[in-house]
Image: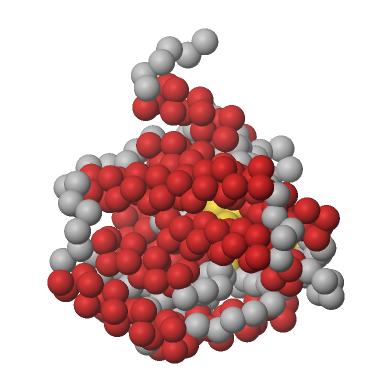
Amino acid sequence: MDLNFTAAEESFRAEARAWLEANVPHNLPSGDTREGFDLHVLWEKKLYDARWSAVSWPTEFGGRGASLWEWLIFEEEYYRAGGPQRVTQNGIFLLAPTIFEFGTEEQKATFLPRMAAADDLWCQGWSEPDAGSDLAGIKSRATRDDAAGGWILNGQKTWTTRGAFCNWVFGLFRTDPDAARHSGMTYMMVPLDAPGVTVRGVERLDGDEGFAEVFLDDVFVSDDLVLGGVNEGWGVAMATTSSERGLTLRSPGRFCAAADRLVDLWKRQSQVGTSDPSLRDAVAQSWMEAEAYRLATLADVSGLVEGKSTGARSSLTKIFWSELDVHLNETAVRLLGPAGELIEGSPDAVDDGAWMKAFEFSLSGPIYAGTNEIQRNVVAERVLGLPRK
């Protein structure tokens, strides 16, 4: 693995850094609130206008045709400049790679440019009341309507991130209820303004309102909204979950920037004499873990560039970044002492309560994208080759 970037890649970094430093907005409200979501969308449109929203995509879909290395560089610079969390992430980082792999040319031309431009905002319809990490347990069904050339959907999806604000959802539906658990499912894309769709917000612990339940009652979806083959949805979904658990959803730049902010917090707290000396090692450990994640990602990208598939290793990646995130933000809250409990808007909150908000969110990391208990089983069986009990 060569850790040196080429002159062209450093030029790309310089261009990205200059633009981001001149344009990144700061102190936006949370993208999981209505006000914040709308402001984030405006920012994402500005990214698109400058062709930074999906740098690794082909130019005809709104990208720059950048390499994976350049994408990593952009992510580093984006978070180093303080760029806000991407509200287009479910589309650009999860659905788009699946469309590139399984979509028709018409689907690519229809959905990808609008996704890059933040004209269509996507949420993910995986979880159901009785099917979370056990994705094969879904019960939402799709019944064939030959006369209309499509499918009638019925069921419920839950824990859809930003589902209260998005206009599309993608997910799995049972098209053959008599098939085996991992068969008979089809991957579909559903407009949330279709007749029969009801979206109900679910308030989070931190008060943000973006979570939602999605109810589908006799919702018609045409054949051109099926991604991949009918009854072949499990294989298509596994491509999406690989992106969700792997490097595209949580690039190392995000955690390296957070680790640098943690070190800065330690220094600031030390200057005013409120830091706990016993936490110095925990701060250093968090920084080292973020750097280790960056190096591990570089190794994975080296393999991808050589044509290798990450496969089940994406589960290992998911464990790595989700537990790193918890440890890093937990260390910050402990470092702040009683002030760490102050939330956004509190007059005495350090960094406007950003550390507590990040800590609360980090606790969901070991759960979403498949619980870490499940991911450890995957790693044990499919990466290490250990026998099933």
Q: In the image shown, does 381 or 136 lie closer to the viewer?
A: 381
Q: In the image shown, does 318 or 108 lie closer to the viewer?
A: 318
Q: How many marks?
A: 0
Q: Quadrant of residue 300?
A: top left
Question: Residue drawn 38% across and 86% down?
Answer: 19
Q: Decide: is 307 above or below 107.
A: above
Q: In the image shown, does 250 or 201 lie closer to the viewer?
A: 250
Q: Decide: is 28 above or below 201.
A: below
- Residue 67 visible? The answer is yes
Q: Position of residue 239 (x, y in %)?
A: 40, 47
Q: In the image shown, does 119 or 36 lie closer to the viewer?
A: 36
Q: In screen coordinates, is 313 left or right of 357?
A: left
Q: Position of residue 298 (x, y in %)?
A: 30, 50
Question: Residue drawn 56% across and 68% down?
Answer: 85
Q: Position of residue 266 (x, y in %)?
A: 61, 58
Q: Quadrant of residue 33?
A: bottom right
Q: Position of residue 255 (x, y in %)?
A: 49, 56
Question: Residue drawn 51% across and 74% down?
Answer: 83
Q: Quadrant of residue 87?
A: bottom right
Q: In screen coordinates, is 151 left or right of 231?
A: right
Question: Residue drawn 44% across and 84% down?
Answer: 21
- Residue 249 visible? The answer is no
Snapshot colouring: secondary structure
